[in-house]
Image: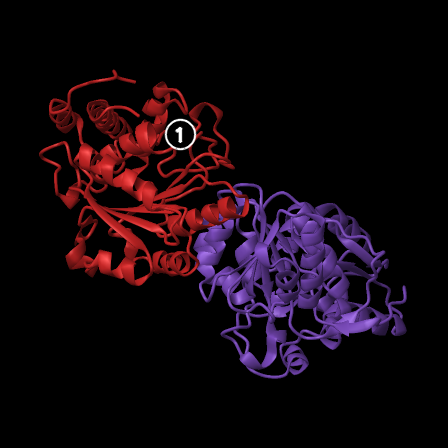
Chain colours: A purple, B red
Amino acid sequence: MKEYKIIAEKDTRSGFGEGLLLAGKENENVVALCADLTPSVRMDLFQKEFPERFVEVGIAESNMISIASGMALSGKIPFVGSFAAFSTGRTYDQIRQSVAYSDTNVKIAGSHAGLTLGEDGATHQILEDLGLMKMLPNMVVINPCDYTQAKQATLAAARYQGPVYIRYGRPKVPVFLTEETPFEIGKALMLNEGKDVSIFATGHLVWQAILAAQQLEKQGMDAEVIDIHTIKPLDAEAILKSVKKTGCAVVCEEHEYNGGLGDSIAQLLVRNYPAPVEYIGVDDSFGESGKPMELMAKYGLDAEHIKLAVEKVLKRK
Amino acid sequence: MKTIKELESISTQIRIDVLRMINSAASGHPGGSLDCADLFAALYFGIMDVEPKNFTRAGVNEDMFFLSIGHIAPVWYSALARRGYFPVEELGTLRKMGSRLQGHPSWHSNLPGVRVASGSLGQGLSVGVGAALSKKMDKDNKLVFTLHGDGEIEEGQIWEAAMFAGANKVDNLVAIIDVNHAQIDGRTENVCDSSSLKEKFLAFKWDVLECNGNDMQELVSALQQCKEHTGKGKPVMLLMNTKMGFGVDFMEDDNGWHGKAPNDEQTQKALSQLEETLGDY
């Protein structure tokens, strides 16, 4: 299969920080707001470079979202940053009314998403954010897989006209994409062409999917691996094309089954091309404290579990 | 600037519009709409510097208004139509399918004058703060006005925005609270006592003015003072004392009229107390 090398180990939130800085240099209308987590969500780079375009809101996420919508009216492109649990769940009503329904050009950054937040525990480890955001009309939802893609996605969000939610993570994870890797909102990224099974993965699970495919190859199985960085709008064409070829799918995400990418893909397949699907995700549960990778293993979100899911789905073909 | 008499005449017409619109829709919120009719006449026909014929969402080099209490949309729609933002004939479509005059204001429906949706309470002060920050960044010296209810301020986000605006000296912002002491479940003092508003906002580093919001002379004078108080390092708050349902005797000071449409008979009775001025829509 196609070879991927670990170029470095970096957190996707740092990709956001770099991307935001670049977006700020590219367009003077880009402004940033944070709710007392500026270094944690890596907005300090932007803050230092453009202090006059940075707003420290204090610990008031709801206020931050609505202030951003007010700022957007005059043509500014506000990025708001907090932990994903607070920048989506806590502020859902503000996002719904002042951003999505009002179609204001606000970019919502949710850092420290998912189990990989680790030790802080379930209060902060949101596993529902993708579902919350994808249910909102007008909302684009992006979940980058590595540092480089996080940077690309942030820049793309700044250039896109309309509300966007982007999810980032806390731990350092493999960087395996390069600046030359294409990124387009709504366009799935083919990582490995295969014929036996389609593995659709998003966020931190993309690297795990590559590892799983490598192991499967040794067992004589040819897995197609596709990175679905944009949960909404979903690249229906790429997904259907792949499943029509392979006849089955495994969907991998650091998220609840309910409302996640798996839901979206299942809905697409049921309507257009029914095929067996297995899920890698969290089954109606909150997280807990622990080391990120230990938690991922415990909840079944790693290459080993993806491999088992592939073996299972192949038997259902 | 129109005379006080002219403004009073406009506010009367706005009240008539509100009653007809809500009666025709058979739903809506007459209480707050009626008691804010004087304010809307004063803002749109005297105080605010706006561009009705060239409405833009960006609101550059003009004053901007945000209705945080979206449920009193009828009074806003009437003022906007009477000021020339859209044809007055459209007022009759309130709350009907396909109308731009949604039950609560919507940007989605593309109605000139409305910039952000409102209805879910407590968000408008933050939105206004954001618009005011943008004006400061852009060196646009026009003002932002927001309108709230004394029930609405039970929402925590209002106080987040109040704290932020005071701490950050957002002094190109004039927030108005319609202090009518009425909300759905009863008198505000009984539902969740919101008294000592002046002291509360002073403690949040605001400049606070008060007036009778149903006395045009006093209201216009207070709003002019509010404008004069901007640019001095503090956001400006106008506590506008009104009576819910003002202008229709059987609705006055009765929270039962918060969100109930008058039937045909009640509408006729109410209209008989108001002298038609600008003509029916």
Task: Decide which of A136, A247 is in the foreground and name it.
Answer: A136
Q: Quadrant of the C terminus of chain B?
A: top left
Which residue was labeled with disc 1?
B97
Residue A263: x %, y % from top left: 61, 57
Q: Quadrant of the N terminus of chain B?
A: top left
Please report the residue visible at 66 percent of the width from the left and 67 percent of the height from the top: A13
Residue A273 seen by the camera: no
Residue A49 seen by the camera: yes
Please report the residue visible at 63 percent of the width from the left and 66 percent of the height from the top: A44
Please report the residue visible at 15 percent of the width from the left and 58 percent of the height from the top: B190
Residue B69: x %, y % from top left: 32, 44
Task: Decide which of A288, B3 is in the foreground and name it.
Answer: B3
Task: Decide which of B4, A207 is in the foreground and name it.
Answer: B4
Residue A16: x %, y % from top left: 67, 62
The chain ID associated with circle 1 is: B
Give the vertical position of A228 relative to A241 (above or below): below
Q: Residues within 10 Å of mark 1 (few under 14, many from 20)?
A: few
- Number of marks in the rendered image: 1
Amino acid type at circle 1 is: Met
Please report the residue visible at 84 percent of the width from the left and 71 percent of the height from the top: A7
Give the vertical position of A283 relative to B227 (above or below): below
Q: In this view, does B227 lie to the left or right of B16?
A: right
Q: Quadrant of residue A276?
A: bottom right
Q: Quadrant of residue B228?
A: top left
Residue B117: x %, y % from top left: 43, 42
Q: What element carries label 1?
A: loop
Q: Is residue B222 left or right of residue B269?
A: right
Task: Decide which of B71, B161 is in the foreground and name it.
Answer: B161
